[in-house]
Amino acid sequence: MIEIAQRFKFIIIYLVTIFIFSLVYGIFLYEDFRFPENVNKAWFDWLYFSVITITTLGYGDIVPITGWSKTFVIFESLTGLLLLGLFLNDEAHRGQERKNIDGLKNQLTTCLEFLSLMNGHLSYAFNEIDKSDNFKDGFIFIRDLFDGEKQLHKQNYKVDSISSILRLISNNFKSARSNPVIHKLGASQNLSIILASLEAIEAEHLKTKIDMVELRHYYFNLYNNAVFIEKYTQ
């Protein structure tokens, strides 16, 4: 209910304005208008005149004849135009925001698809290193996985380089972070952590000796924040 009232606040103010001006005309400016003959000047007549005035229709059957009445009629007409303009501007802004949200969902969905792909690659790599009797071979294995396309013979597991996937993910997340809606959703910090984790993972594999503890730390930090933003794609 509150959300509906917030969306149509200018229409509500518009309707209230009609009612208020009808009371002003009927109570304070009762003798300041010329009415057609045989009209009793009932409250409904003042309400009718207020509607005609705020919508700028101006049929001419009821006419202000004093300076005060003309001033209030002008003021009501301008108020109606202002409120209508504010309502249309608010609707245009909401439409753009919905467009931004849809765009953000698509961006995050793409990011999460790439993350899912990298998740499979890194999980497999971690498992291979954990099983390896020769840590040197394990490091060579994960470096190959990062640096180029590799055929993992044990399970016929062919992948693109993790480095290329990292760049794709990073570019998509940077694009998502620039979306103005992301700050309103409160997910900008999570995207910043994800981007920092991606950069750290990329930097870690370039070292002479890969620190698997650090690599796992960055990886799980990345994964946990990705899980958090996944709800925004629903």
Image (spheres, rainbow, N blue to C red):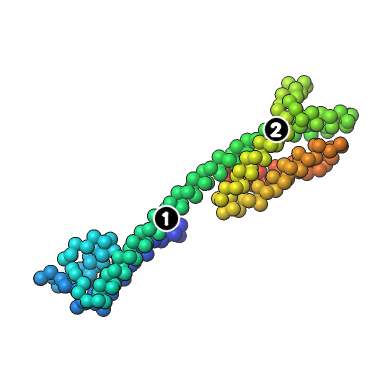
Q: Is residue 224 left or right of residue 103?
A: right
Residue 230 higher or lower than 69, as above or below: above
Q: How far apart are marks 2 and 1 (CA)?
A: 43 Å
> Pointer 1: residues within 10 angstroms few (<14), some, or many (20+)?
few
Mark 2 residue crowding within 10 angstroms, few (<14) / some (14–19) / many (20+): some
Q: Residue at x 64, y 43 (%)?
A: 173
Asked whether residue 116 appears in the rendered view, the answer is no
Where does label 1 land, which residue?
89
Question: Which element is circle 1 on?
Answer: helix
Residue 211 picture quarter: top right
**The quadrant where residue 14 appears:** bottom left
* Front position in the image: 199 or 226: 199
Q: Position of residue 85 (x, y in %)?
A: 38, 58
Q: Nearer the viewer, residue 66 or 115?
A: 66
Quarter in which the N terminus is drawn? bottom left
Which residue is rendered at x = 80% and y = 37% of the image? Answer: 205
**Badge number at residue 164:** 2
